[in-house]
Image (tube, rainbow, N blue to C red):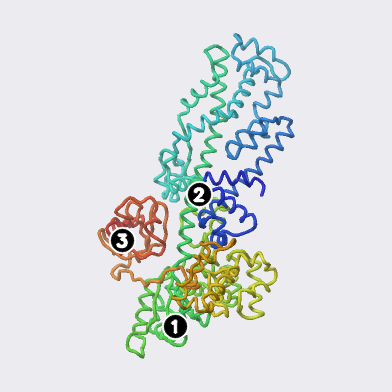
Amino acid sequence: MEHLKIFTQLIANELHLSDHAVENTLKLLDEGCTIPFISRYRKERTGGLDEVQITSISNRLAVLQEIAKRKDTVVKTITELGKMTADLEKRINDCWESTVLEDIYLPYKPKRRTRAQIAREQGLEPLAQLLLLQREPSPQQAAMRFVCGDIIDAKQALQGAQDIIAEQVSEDERSRNQVRAAFRREAFIVSKVVKAKKDTDEAAKYSDYFDWEEPLKRCSSHRLLAMRRGESEGILRVSITIDDDDAVQRLQRNYVRGNGACQRLVAEAVEDGYKRLLCPSIETEFSNLSKERADEEAIKVFTENLRQLLLGAPLGQKRVMGIDPGFRTGCKVVCLDAQGNLLHHEAIFPHPPINHRAQATVHLQQMIADYHIEAIAIGNGTASRETKSFVEDCIQSLPSPTGEGSGVRLFVVSEDGASVYSASATAREEFPDEDVTVRGAVSIGRRLMDPLAELVKIDPKSIGVGQYQHDVDQTKLKHSLDQTVESCVNQVGVNLNTASQHLLMYVSGLGPVLAKNIVEYRKENGAFTSRSQLKKVPRLGPAAFQQCAGFLRIPGAKNPLDNSAVHPESYGVVELMAKDHHCSVDDLINNKEKRSEIDIRHYVTDTIGLPTLTDIMKELEKPGRDPRQQIEEFEFDASVQTMEDLHEGMELPGIVTNITNFGAFVDIGVHQDGLVHISQLADKYVSDPTQVVRLHQHVRVRVIEVDLRRHRISLSMKGMTK
């Protein structure tokens, strides 16, 4: 890899990691290894770096590679202009900060025909240099020597010379750094409402920012993104400002010496250069930087929420009924087998205006019996609570052979993004003969069985978690979300024989083409019986096999290690352990005493160290274990149905539906989520809401304010226990 040594030192210093770990990680990434594979199976080479650290290395590498490309462009352009010197080339080669690089390049950068460029073409550069020397007692008289051609008098000549000085000031590195430091130290972000929009309905949601001002360095990401959205919608005018007079005076001290006629002209040129060129440039720079930081924070919140959602507790392979609730259009009911296949669907109408409750009861109970339903998933949208109450009545009146109830478990499931999935090409491919309502209900049912397997089919931006996801850099957001999905899929592991193409494509080393080839091979040849069969899949070569094999599981395989996170490259050491202790691999897995006899230090080699051997022993203890938590049932307070039922001081159960960096939104069953502000999350100071709550967590909250007009509910978790 080009620049490996430099990249290693830069990244190691920035992330406070060892050079050895960073260098090896960079080499592995260059070899095409994925982040999950490196963190899980190459701990000896990386010194045990985790996914977060390796992701940071990978992201920083991408930035440095972009800077390297930019440097090539800069060197080529300056060389073609014939202005490259040895010192200048060394400065460029040694530079690895994009801001510094652009400052170096600015005087040479091709630009539109500026006022200064026109003045240079008119031969006024010597006059500008004469003014900068500030020795000429009569600049007017000196300017007369330049009156010719398009220059009709001394005034025009002096103005052109001042334009050249103004541009020089704006492109001077010291001047830029001085103004940049002022912005960094004292900049304010200011938001004003556009007067013509002030009283419009669309402006109401931005009322907090009609006349807003605060130090830029203290502006939180959600406030900055809100202001920028208001600006893009034409409702707000947003600017970043400093004390212009103070900044001009500081710059003038760099250029003006004394108080003569030349000095006054130079002072005017410096002020013009600041106000017309330098200040707008640095304001734009800080506007972009602050937006980038806000984007990073928002993306971090989004990815953490997505991680929690994808790693939500699965019910597992049960026979499930999925219900997409509704009033006028009825409730769409689907029955699924334990593998999530659609067995039956129909619509029932237990609610007004049709109100066929008795008929709906009979049909629902019949479906539960006919399809041996073990659990019911109800979407959390319109008519959710009413449907849940109806289904509970149906279940309670079901006949039971034991007299202890039907045993059917009931869950409310988030349906965010289900409508997006139901109209997608994926859904049409899965269910070409069903309409969108059936597909949506299937998605709800499958989310209960395995949230990860179902949610990977949906664009993460449609799942409804995070803040201002449509306002942030979409390329960075997609990259981060894809990394998160890949991380979650590989953390859990994938059943090779039941996984959909969409789930398989996120497995380390696969992607869309190989995922499709695996599914087609499975259709033609039946279920996989060993991981080694993967090598027969078209285009799945040794490199892809190395990356993916450890994350794919085969329940019931002849070799029990095929259903574990032990990588095939380590099968030999496990078999050696079994041989040394006179037993089979099965015996090692099933016999704790046998495992306790193993001293893993005896199996350390040049390629397998203690970190890998420790992981192997943990996996033998519980092969193929699912890292996700157990699913929990939940009940809203039956006495609360609408916002009108709420009053201050009321304590209620709720479900965390979204987490932002200013707090958490909680569903308390009134069709309007309440906000637990970050200051109300705990009895102690909280800097990051994700340290206190997780998505879909069951919590208890206290109502502290109800605003019926604005449909806002303020909640608190202080002093509350679950």
> What is the x, y in percent for residue 537?
67, 73
Which residue is most to the left?
649
The kind of secondary structure element at disc 2 is helix
Q: Which residue appears at 56% of the width and 46% of the height?
A: 11
Q: Report which residue position mark 3 lands on.
A: 701
Which residue is most to the bottom?
401
Mark 2 crowd level (few <14, some 14–19, many ≥20, 10 Å Cα): many
Dividing the picture into quadrants, the one containing residue 352 is: bottom left
> What is the x, y in percent for residue 490?
54, 65
**Which of the marked residues, 2 or 3, is nearer the chain's N terminus?**
2
- Rendered view: 418 above or below 110: below
Q: Are marks 1 and 3 in contact (CB under 8 Å)?
A: no
* Residue type highlighted by circle 1: Ile
- Give the Cα separation between the discs numbered 1 and 3: 33 Å
- Rendered view: 631 above or below 192: below
**Which of the marked residues, 1 or 2, is nearer the chain's N terminus?**
2
- Give the Cα separation between the discs numbered 2 and 3: 30 Å
> What is the x, y in percent for residue 447?
48, 71
Q: Report which residue position mark 1 lands on.
A: 373
Q: Report which residue position mark 2 lands on.
A: 295
Of 330 and 161, the residue lying toward us: 161
Q: Is residue 390 left or right of residue 604?
A: left
Of 340 and 203, the residue lying toward us: 340
